[in-house]
Every structure is written in C-alpha cells, then in structure tokens.
Image: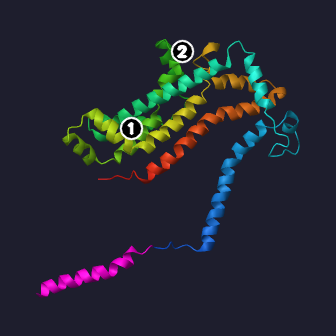
Amino acid sequence: MSKKKKQDGANITKVKHTPAILKRRKPNRSRIGDFALYIFLFLVALLMVFPLVFAVSSALKPLDELFMFPPKLFAQNPTFDNFADLFVTMGKSWVPFSRYLFNTAFITFVGTVGHLIVASMAAFVLAKYDFPGGKTFFNIVVVALMFNGYVTAIPNYLILNKLGLIDTYWAVIIPAFASPMGLFLMKQFMDGLPMSLIEAAKIDGAKEWTVFIDIVMPNVKPAWLTMIIFSVQGLWNNKAATYIYSEEKKTLVYALQQIQSGGIARTGQAAAVTVIVMLVPIAIFIASESQILETMASSGLKD
C-alpha cells in the first residue's frame, strides 16, 4: 500500500506542476534591448538593399541626371528611355537579342539541372554508403573548394579542347556539372539524415531510386534550393568568352557588357544593363526564399 501511495503522490505532484511547465516562457530581454535589436536589423537591411535601389534608380534617370553633382539617390524625372535605347542598340546587331537570351537561358537551365542531378546523386553515395576511397574522394572535393575559377581556367580549357567542345554550349555546361560547391553542400545536409529512415524504407520494399527521390531529396530541400540559387547566379552571369567564340553562341551578359564599354554616351544603357543582368538571380532567390526558410525550420532530423 505504501508503494501505491507513493506512486499516487508522484502522479499528483506531476499534475500540479504540469500547468507551470506549460506556461509560456518570456524571453530574458528588455524592451530597450528589443528596440535596439530592431534598429540594428533595420540599418543592416538598409545597407543590403541600398545597391539594388541605387541600380534601379540609376537605370530610370535621364542622361543629364546621371552626371549630376552632387548625385541624387532617386530619379527626379524617371524615364524608361535607357531601356528603350538599349533594345534599339541590341536590335542593330546582326545577331538578334532573342538569340543571346536563348543562349544564356539554355546554358543556365541545362547546367543547373545537370549540376543538381550529379551533385545530389554523388552526395547520397558519399554520405550514406561506405566504400573504398570514399573519404579520400570527398577530401579532394573539399580541397577543390579552395581553387578559384581563374586558377582552373587553363586546365579546363586544355581538357575541353582535347574533347572538341570549345566553341560549343557544352564548354560552359559540363564544368558546371562538376562544381564542388554543390556536392559539398548536398553531402553535408545528407549526413544529418538518419540512416534508420532509409533502412525502414528499404524494409518496406522501396528501391534505391525510390528512396533517393521520395525520401532523401525532400528532406534535403534547403540544400538543393540553395545550390540552385548559386548555380543560376554563376551561369547567368558567365560571359563564357574564354570558351565560346562564335557570335551567335555568345551569352546575353557578354553582349550587354559590350554595350557598357561604348563610352559616356551609353552610360544610361549601361545602368539598364546592370538591372537586367541582376533581375533573374534576384527573382529566383525571392521565389525560393520562403521555401528555404520553411524547410530549414523543419529539417532537423537526427538519429
């Protein structure tokens, strides 16, 4: 009986303390501290958004306002003449503007999709399977992160030249497949995925491909969304002038930068070029941002 009474007393104690535990804890911050934090974040946000505002404002300024001193942040008489002049200039080229746009879109899309497939599949094998040389291979990938693109430009050119890929789209696309950043990012995320989840799926009869597509990839969504953003930014802004010589295969960024080098008379067009070049990467980042934040908050799976 005494043992039963002790258990009943313990249960009563737990019930009594349950409401106290369930009470919402208040953060140990004062209102002044919260206000200071918000002010700091607001200033950082202004600092981050200033280049974007300045670029858009400059693209909307007429030529006389671009050379005004002291310069003003916002356009006094906003106009789209810079964009109109830019398209007129591009229209005079013997290669249509749409061709440059297609070249860049094709390279960016194929390079990003291929990079996602290669990096995710290789990362899955490195993260979840032990095989001879696996750790050594990943160490090589980590070392490759230290090398800048300018360092690897000559070896890449020699290899692509031997393969006969110079002056083709694949001279830009194939090196993008092997970017070490994507493989490193995907592998680090997949390391945190519990192996018990994969084993349970295999016990239920799931094949390797099903496990990879339906279980692994949804749980590492923050990694491949982030990788897509970096890949699109790199390929969209790639001039590819080292590997592509034919004018009809050149990228949009290369053509736009040729207009930028046209001198003082094209200053307004150069400002419009800046906005056009940064438009696509920013749009993709904004479209993916909410998904990245949502999946970051719900992807902390551990064994």
- Residue displayed at 52% across by 48% down: 290
Q: Nearer the viewer, residue 140 or 62?
A: 62
Q: Is residue 159 left or right of residue 102?
A: left
Q: Which mark is residue 139?
A: 1
Residue 67: image x %, image y %?
Answer: 86, 37
- Residue displayed at 64% across by 68% down: 35
Residue 221: image x %, image y %?
Answer: 42, 43
Most common SS among magenta residues: helix
- Residue displayed at 72% across by 44% down: 53
Q: Mark 1 or mark 2: which is in front? A: 2
Q: Examine the rendering and report whether any part of residue 204 can be seen.
A: yes
Q: Is residue 195 left or right of residue 77?
A: left
For residue 179: magenta? no
239 w.r.t. 147: above or below: above
Q: Earlier in the sequence, mark 1 or mark 2?
A: 1
13 w.r.t. 171: above or below: below
Q: Nearer the viewer, residue 212 or 24?
A: 24
For residue 7: magenta? yes
Tell me where the magenta segment starts and ends, as one range. Answer: 1-24
Residue under numbered circle 2: 168
The quadrant where residue 235 appears: top right
Residue 264: image x %, image y %?
Answer: 84, 28
> Furthest-bottom residue in view?
2
